Image (spheres, rainbow, N blue to C red):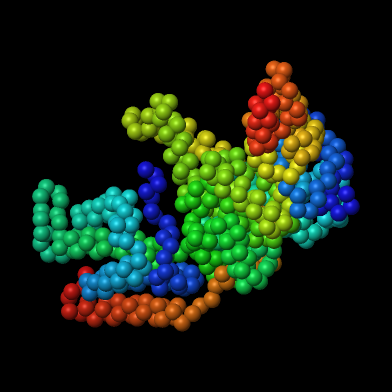
Amino acid sequence: MIKDITIGQYFPGESVLHHLDPRTKLLLTVLYIVILFMAKSMLAFILIVLLTAALIPISGISFKVIAKSLKPLLFIIIFTMTLNLFFTKGEGEPLLSFWIINIYKEGVSFAIYMIVRIICLITGTGVILTYTTSPIQLTDGIEQLLAPLSKIKLPVHEFAMMMSCALRFIPTLVEETDKIMSAQKARGADFTSGSLIRRAKAIIPILIPLFVSAFRRADELAVAMECRCYHGGEGRTRMNSLHFSARDLLVTLVFVLFGAGVVLLNIFTRGIGIGI
Amino acid sequence: MENAFIKTENLSFSYENGDGGENAVLYDINLEIEKGAFVAILGHNGSGKSTLAKLLNMILTPTGGKIYIDGTDITKPDMSEKDIIDLRSKIGMVFQNPDNQLVATIVEEDVAFGPENLGVEPAEIRRRVDEALATVGMTKYARHSPHQLSGGQKQRVAIAGAIAMLPECIVFDESTAMLDPMGRAEVMNTIEKLNREKNITVLHITHNMNEALCADRVIVMSDGRIILDGVPDEVFSHVEELKSVGLGVPQAAELMYSLSKNGIEIGKITGDENKCAQKLFDLINEK
């Protein structure tokens, strides 16, 4: 049940996106989000949707996986949509009007843009970064991007190592939670009915054993790491050292072009009234 | 033994308990293990066998006595951090729970963890990782994530991680205890292969009598002391002693023990199934 969570999971593959340098992908993700939030006109949005839609087959990640990752966000999507739909005040006559609720043309377009934005945000960042970058590459990328900060005594390596350990143990702890829940259910625990407070209380007998075991695991892992000569980041080498290639430059260029396209469309189409 | 790889002299260890007193775990252990040996260490829970293992690579520091690894005294006070790292690269360790000793989310990156810590050149790490994975038969799974693997496979990855540091000795601390019979067989085959083909000294800590039979030498511990030490045949002939410290014996030894207790002349008790079968065969032929 909990195993189905796909958000933030890595899918091995051989696509162009898989082979990009993680540092490039981190920067591209930032760039992508900036482009996404800069878009202000319909054509700009279409351009972004095209880019995102093109990235999915390129990455080799199946649509099913992406649809699954969107499912937990359904509530947020509907919530923002409703808010935008009902509470955006527009000029001119409302499209629909009953009681105190007025729906304007602007509200409808805002709601649609919001949905597109959220779906693109999740899909795009997933495809560019989380689905196609192994957590180790990701932490390596972050470590190297932040490396200059270690000069001012920030524990960059320790931070990266902590993050990669955390990522490593997510599936293990999820599995364990499942097991503990089954064990509690077998003894008559009820997690699904009763008031909110009652249900919250029912979670305590899951959390306590989970915490205890997490600490025990951490202790064992620390010993195992020491046995494998871990002594911090000093003098450590990497098997796969990161290096930028022509591919990185090319993909970045494509993204920059898309960004420029969005900016131009924003300026250009506002004048002819398609914008919002 | 002049060229013992591991040598301990009056080794003892105790830890402080809550009320300021001390709980002794090991008493005066004198042990010599030569290079290339396959030694099984048996003992019930709390007999000090895991503590002994952790003392060998300075995860724990002994409270008394000396330990020599490859002729060097590792208990001397001026051990630098570099000396400790050298020591740990010489003695690899594989633990019980396969989930709690894999660091990375990709098999080959986990195997690379040890050599990376040692500061080995990237190209050499690559070579070592490929070789280690081939040795344990996990090359096919190099790009997999550990949670997609079975227990036995995870444990083989952990072994590959130890081999990649090119150790002279690997300590298996109940590495088969959490595995199903298939996983056990996989791991035992790998351990035997390492010992025979790569001449790696193996210390195999276990509860399983049949696994102990694979070793060249069996050491039995109880309450922090070594009570039996010898070739498996010799050790398993002490059925009563083993039972008195809460250990079982291999089925063959159990059978021969029961027979001799019931007045059947069976001769020397052995844990070896083939020898036992031969004796029974001879016995039936005589009658």
Residue at left offset 72%, top offset 33%: B270
Q: Nearer the viewer, residue A130 or B245?
A: B245
Q: Position of residue B58 (x, y in %)?
A: 77, 49
Q: Position of residue A197 (x, y in %)?
A: 39, 32
Which picture quadrant has residue B26? top right
Outermost residue on the right side: it is B2
Residue at left offset 48%, top offset 72%: A21
Q: Nearer the viewer, residue B210 or A159?
A: B210
Residue at left offset 86%, top offset 54%: B3
Disc tally is 0
Q: Position of residue B8 (x, y in %)?
A: 84, 45
Q: Nearer the viewer, residue B84 or B204?
A: B204
Residue at left offset 74%, top offset 44%: B216
User: Compared with residue B16, is residue A254 higher up or lower down, i.e. above or below?
Assistant: below
User: Compared with residue A72, is residue A132 higher up or lower down, i.e. above or below?
Assistant: below
User: Compared with residue A165, is residue A28 higher up or lower down, i.e. above or below?
Assistant: below
Which picture quadrant has residue A7? bottom left
Q: Nearer the viewer, residue A273 or A226?
A: A226
Left/right placement of residue B264 relative to residue A251 reads: right
